[in-house]
Image (spheres, rainbow, N blue to C red):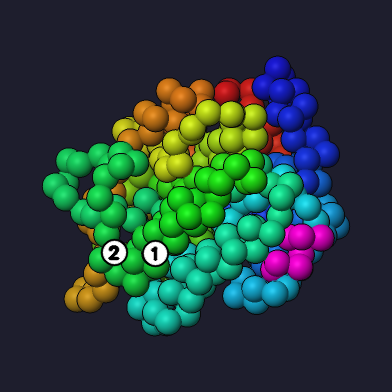
Amino acid sequence: MKNFKKYKKFWANKEVFITGHTGFKGTWLGIILNILKANIHGYALKPEKNSLFIKSKLLKSFKTNTFANINDLDLLKKKLIKTKPSILIHLAAQPLVIESYKNPKKTFETNIIGTLNVLEAAREVKTLKSIIIVTTDKVYKIKKKSKVYVENDELWGTDPYSASKVGAEIVTHSYLNSFFIKKKFNCKIATVRAGNVLGGGDFSENRIIPDIYKAIKNKNNLVLRNPNYIRPWQHVIDPLMGYLKLAQTQFYYKKKLDNRWNFGPNKKSFKKVIDVVNFMKKKNKFKFKIKKNFKINETKVLKLNNLNAKAKLSWKPIWNFKDTLIKVEEWHDLLDKGAEPRKICEKQFFEYLKQE
């Protein structure tokens, strides 16, 4: 695989610092970077016992692990300075809309102040050449249903979660323009926005795939909040490979580079929530019910334009909506047959590279 050799040539022995490495996306990223022989340093809260991080036995694959709050600035700064990374990927977040209504203060502290702390600590690390701040597709101001959002569209925050991520965007670009444009910093910074990521090993609360498998296992009804809402569904590997390609470009690129990127799926993967359910019902037995009078405000239609990343980074989504759900089912089928979670992730990553 030519692409694998190219990726490995770049990432081998690179010092990479990941916040939120114990989460779903962080674990997949850790598995991928471990395959590519990077030296990975993780900073996150302790992993949940039922998490993919624990199930994948990933702890020893990181050169260092720090289990702490992102709002402990002194400790975060100490770890960044000590590890001397050249690439920093900030994933740590409170990632759920529902949770943001239950605990808005914690959401704003984690997603805004946490991001500020990462950037404040990064100012002390002169080895950094690439910083990627992961936000969300929900940062855009909602307009007509047919709108496909591009990177320079207006930002807004209709709920605590999306508002907190808009805050993270504002903080990032403030730091970029205030502190990281000076000649002494040979480091590029960007915010990245992906769609609704799916994949094997997601055991989180209030997410569609984990909720489906819980309904199957427990023979309960799957509860749907908004079955007709449209989302840009994509496999978790797709945006992660976008982040890695961006980091590679930032590392070497000497001229001015865009600092906002969409890594969403192609248009055919803009589907309703009920489309996910109906696909999964073809192979799996479960029932669902629609929760009526659901009062939490969520965006009805989300679509991302990915043309900029395609044109400037030679990145493109590989697995469409159907492919993604097939891979999710395959992951869980193999798990049920006794396969190790990490081995399944590695298998699917190499299958992805073959199609890239």
Q: Position of residue 62 (x, y in %)?
A: 81, 55
Q: Amino acid at mark 2?
A: Gly
Q: Is residue 250 magenta?
A: no
Magenta region, residue range: 76-82
Question: Helix, strand or loop at disc 1?
Answer: helix
Q: With 330 as the anchor, is 137 left or right in this view?
A: left
The quarter of the image holding the N terminus is top right
Question: Helix, strand or loop at disc 2?
Answer: loop
Residue at 46% across, 25% down: 312
Q: Position of residue 350 (x, y in %)?
A: 69, 31
What residue is disc 1 on? 167
Q: Position of residue 4 (x, y in %)?
A: 71, 25
Report the predominant secondary structure element of the magenta stretch: helix
Q: Which corner quadrant of the image does residue 354 belong to? A: top right
Q: Are marks 2 and 1 in contact (CB under 8 Å)?
A: yes
Q: Is residue 80 magenta?
A: yes
Q: Amino acid at mark 1?
A: Gly
